[in-house]
Image (cartoon, helix red, strand yellow):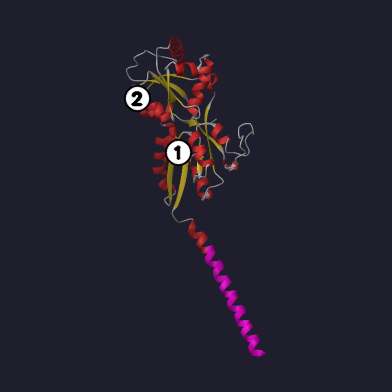
Amino acid sequence: MKKFLAGLLAACMAFSLTACSTSGGANASAGADSGEATELVVFAAASLTETLEQIAEDYKEVAPDVTLTFNFDSSGTLKTQIQEGADCDVFISAAQKQMDQLDAAADASVNTEGLDFVQSDSRLNLLENKVTLAVPNDNPKGIDSFDSLAKHLQAGDILLAMGNSDVPVGQYTQKILAFYGLDETALASAGCITYGSNVKEVTTQVREGSVDAGVIYATDAFSAGLTVVDEATADMCGQVIYPAAVLKTSAHPEAAQAFLNYLSTDEAMAVFASVGFSPAA
C-alpha cells in the first residue's frame, strides 16, 4: 500500500509539473506572436491605390513584422467578395453604403441582408474626397463645368465616362445627372455615356482621350495628371466620405486595429493630403 501511495504521489507531481510547463509554454508562445510575421489583408477602394501603397512603405518602419496585402477594386465588388468569404482584415470603402451593407449596426433599410461583418466599435470616417469633372488634355469639346457638361449631354454631342451603378463614383455621378434632370438610361441608349467598373477605368478612358469627359475623384485626377474643370457641390451629390473598419472575420484583429489607428496619424494623413484627400469631418 505504501508503495502504491508513493507511486500515486509521484504521478501527481509529474502531472503538475507537466501542466505548469505547458502553461508557461503557451504564455511564451503568445508573447512571441507579437514579434512574428503577420500578413494583413486590406480591401480598399481603387481610388486609394497610390496613397496606400506609399503608406505601406512607411508602415514598415512602424511595424516591421507586418506585411500589408492590398486588394483594390470598386467598393461594391469588394463588399461582394467579403460577403462571399474572402479573407480580409480591414475594409476601406469609398462610400458609406457598402460599409453599411456589411454592418449589423447600420440601418436595416441599407443592410437589407442582415450581414454582420463589421467590428462596429472600430468603424470610423477616415477621409473625404471630392467628385470632379475631368477632361482630356486637349479638351476637344471645350467643356468647362458641370453646367457645360449638362448642356452637351442634352444636345447629345459628347461621350461621358462614368462608373457603373454599383460603384460609388458611379452612384455620385447618377446623383449629378439627376440634379440636372438628365435621364441616364436615355443618354446611355443614345451613345452619350460609357461605363467603367471602377474609378481607375473611368480615369483611364479620360487620360487616353477615348471620351470627352469623365466624372472621377479629385485624387484620381491628380494622380493621373488630368485637367479638372469643375468640382461637384454637396447639393449635387452629397459628401464623399470613406469609412474604414476592422472586420469580425479578421485573423489578426489587434494588428488590424493598430494599422487602422495608424491611418489617422499625421504621418499617414500627410500622404493622403498629398493627392487631395482631407480628414473626414
Quarter of the view holding residue 5: bottom right
Viewer-side residue, 136 vs 174? 174
Q: Can residue 129 be seen in this view?
A: no
In this rendering, is residue 269 above or below 89? Answer: above
Question: Is 249 displayed left or right of 229 in the figure?
Answer: right
Residue 242, how many percent across, how many down? 51, 33
Question: Is 94 displayed left or right of 226 in the figure?
Answer: right
Q: Residue sitting at 64 percent across and 87 percent down?
A: 4
10 Å crowding of disc 2: few (<14), some (14-19), many (20+): many
Quarter of the image with the C terminus is top right
The residue type indicated by label 1 comes to: Ala
Q: What stretch is highlighted in magenta?
A: 1-27
Residue 210, how many percent across, how many down? 35, 22
Residue 204, how many percent across, how many down? 37, 27
Say which residue label 1 marks: 268
Q: Is residue 70 visible?
A: yes
The residue type indicated by label 2 comes to: Arg
Asked if the stretch drawn in magenta spans residue 277, the answer is no
Q: Residue sitting at 55 percent across and 19 percent down?
A: 235
Say which residue label 2 marks: 207
Quarter of the view holding residue 23: bottom right
Which of pointers 2 and 1 indicates the residue nearer the eye? 2
The circle drawn on residue 125 is none
Secondary structure state at the residue bearing disc 2: helix
